[in-house]
Amino acid sequence: MALLELDRVSKTFRTPGNGSVHALDGLSMVLDAGQFLALQGPSGCGKTTLLLIAGGLLEPTAGSVRLNGQNPYALTPDRRARFRAETIGFVFQQFHLAPYLNVLDNVLSAAIATGAKDALPRAQSLIARFGLEPRMRHVPGQLSTGERQRTALARAVLNRPKLLLADEPTGNLDRASADIVLNHLAEFAQAGGAVLLVSHSEHAVRRAQRVIPMRDGKAVPPPDPAAPSPAPKQRE
């Protein structure tokens, strides 16, 4: 079942002097429940812009977005914020943890918008599952980078979202810590959720079930297997 549908989505940013930058150019994609999809491409190709549009954080200039059957941009700002909190979990490269909150309170912060009654026992269970129980009362400055990202991931899944949006979630991690995070993302998809990953890392992208290469705001079409191979160059 299609959980996320982007239909000919474009995004243009205005620049000083009445110029413009086309970050996305008519991109379409479908992400089903249970899928782990990765977007791969160089910096500036539109990956993060697409992620923000998919997450209801950045309205497209043209095209349509449907998430769990809903157009998030048709909602009022308050209803859209609640819809995001109930439907999407975000995982970022820079973690975005509150530096003055400990691990437990950072994870629980995801429940502020939803008021989930089971937030505390669920947060404690996730912290234990992600191997953070001994660090539950530590603030981010006392954690390793891998522990910070696992805290951010626990926060992202606290509200039982249907979709995880992960923007370079392993960019600051060593290989072992990256594998732990990627394993959790894969398990989320295997349990019926959907994951949309943005990464430069070949190691991270290889964990996805499907990869969409991007360049200049567009999806790069896969090579046509029926197309003839280019003729070898002749030696002069």
Image: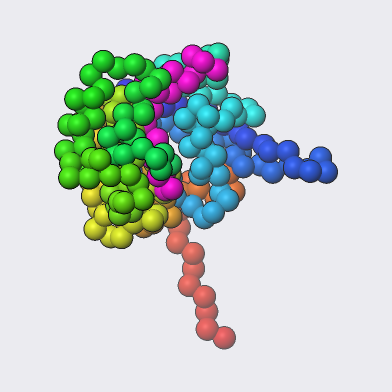
Give residue 179's position: percent from left, percent from top: 25, 53
Looking at the picture, does residue 68 appear above or below residue 15? above
User: What is the number of callouts on the image?
Assistant: 0
Give the colouring mode of the picture.
Answer: rainbow
Q: Which quarter of the picture shows residue 236?
A: bottom right
Left or right? Give the position of 210 relative to 131: right
- In this view, the residue in front, 32 or 162, is 162
> Which segment did they paint magenta?
77-95
Residue drawn at 31 percent across, 60 percent down: 174
Give residue 34's position: percent from left, percent from top: 27, 31
Is residue 43 visible in the rendered structure shown here?
Answer: yes
- In this view, the residue in front, 148 or 103, is 103
Give residue 92's position: percent from left, percent from top: 42, 43
The verdict on residue 178 being magenta is no
Is residue 206 visible in the rendered structure shown here?
Answer: no
Q: Which image quadrant: the N terminus? A: top left
- In this view, the residue in front, 196 or 145, is 145
The verdict on residue 81 being magenta is yes
Left or right? Give the position of 161 relative to 25: left
Left or right? Give the position of 122 relative to 54: left
Residue drawn at 69 percent across, 43 percent down: 21
Residue drawn at 57 percent across, 30 percent down: 58
Give residue 185's position: percent from left, percent from top: 28, 41
